[in-house]
Amino acid sequence: MIFYLFGVSFFIIFIYFLLLPYLKKLKFGQVVREVGPRNHLKKNGTPTMGGALIFISFIIVFLSLLVFIKLNYGIKFDYLFIMTLFIPLIGYFIIGFVDDLLIIVKRKNNGLKANLKFAMELLVALMFYLSLIILDFDTKIRIFSFELDLLFFYGLLIILMFTSTTNATNLTDGIDGLLTSTTLPILVGYIILGLTYQNYLVVILSISLFISLLLFLFFNFPKAKLFMGDTGSLFIGAFIAIIPILLKEELSLLIFGFVYLFETLSVILQVSYFKLSKGKRLFKMTPFHHHLELIGLSDFLINLIFFLCSSLFTFLGLVYTGVLF
């Protein structure tokens, strides 16, 4: 079954990459920010919105796995709940898609206005929370061995989880293969958690995205032929936020997603230090991966560092949840 899913996804992505020369002719490419590292300017015109490819592949693999497990193992799923889960996944995908499309149309790296984009992200997260309330979803969170019922404050937690994670994954998507390299270890951790908790929906979801990202990386590394854009980074961020909610391990997101969090913190620290020191910089450039670029590290080495760090914090996340030790 796994070989079949790899085959289907491989075919989808292979066909798309065959179309890349035509997309370049149509100028269906990314406009690189001028404020970034100067060596990024050579990537101007690289086709973008590859996140749509990841999303399509993910849907096909997910539905195939869902049918396969139901027919062969008789496991029943709550399809209404599954549809609810896709509210943030599709919602953030659409936000990213519109943002990327506007960048292509306007030929400037400024798609949706920041306030509008953030408002849309808040709305999608709120819609998801209200849907969970209608389904009588548990609003308790676990803090080590203690449980705390947040009641309506649980909605604030969900909004914070989605908006912070999607923006953090967006920041991390700044070097060829970086977001994918950082996300793959986390998905392995989620698969292990899903199997341990016998939450097969989490297992299916995580395997589906893992296969899609792995094949996207296979075609797209070491040098990006296609950017995933906000279409992909926001979708991935929503996915990473939704799994701890399904597992009722909401606070574990801080550990599993620490690399994303650090990327965001590096920006906050840079801005704060710049203001307090009246013009001095803590890093050469933020997010932190740009600092590593500017001190001379290659894209491959930066990807490796982020992969290893993500693997370490995935391990620590499994320790925190009690799966290990």
Image: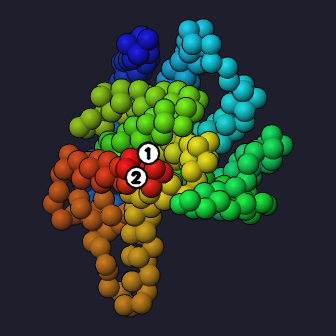
At x 79%, y 60%, the residue is: 152
Q: Residue at left 80%, top 40%?
A: 135
Q: Position of residue 234 (x, y in %)?
A: 54, 46
| Amino acid type of the residue that numbered disc 1 sits on in the rendered structure | Val
Q: Residue furthest right?
A: 134
Mark 1 surroundings within 10 Å by alpha-carbon count, few (fewer than 14), some (14 through 19), many (20 or more): some
The quadrant where residue 50 appears? top left
SS state under label 1:
loop
Residue that label 2 marks? 319
Residue 12 on image: x %, y %: 44, 17
- Mark 2 residue type: Val
Q: In which quarter of the image is the N terminus?
A: top left
Asked if disc 2 and disc 1 are in contact, CB closer than 8 Å, the reply is: yes
Q: What colour scheme does the image use?
A: rainbow
Q: Regarding mark 2 in the picture, which secondary structure is present there?
A: helix
Labelled disc at residue 37? none
Q: Name the quadrant containing residue 260.
A: bottom left
Horizontally, residue 124 falls left or right of residue 142, namely right
Q: Which residue is drawn at 44% across and 81% down?
A: 272
In front: 36, or 183?
183
- Position in image of residue 283 (x %, y %): 29, 73
Any part of residue 264 in sight: yes
Separation (CA) of disc 2 from disc 1:
6 Å
Q: Name the residue under label 1.
A: 323
Horizontal relation, residue 244 to residue 15: left or right: right
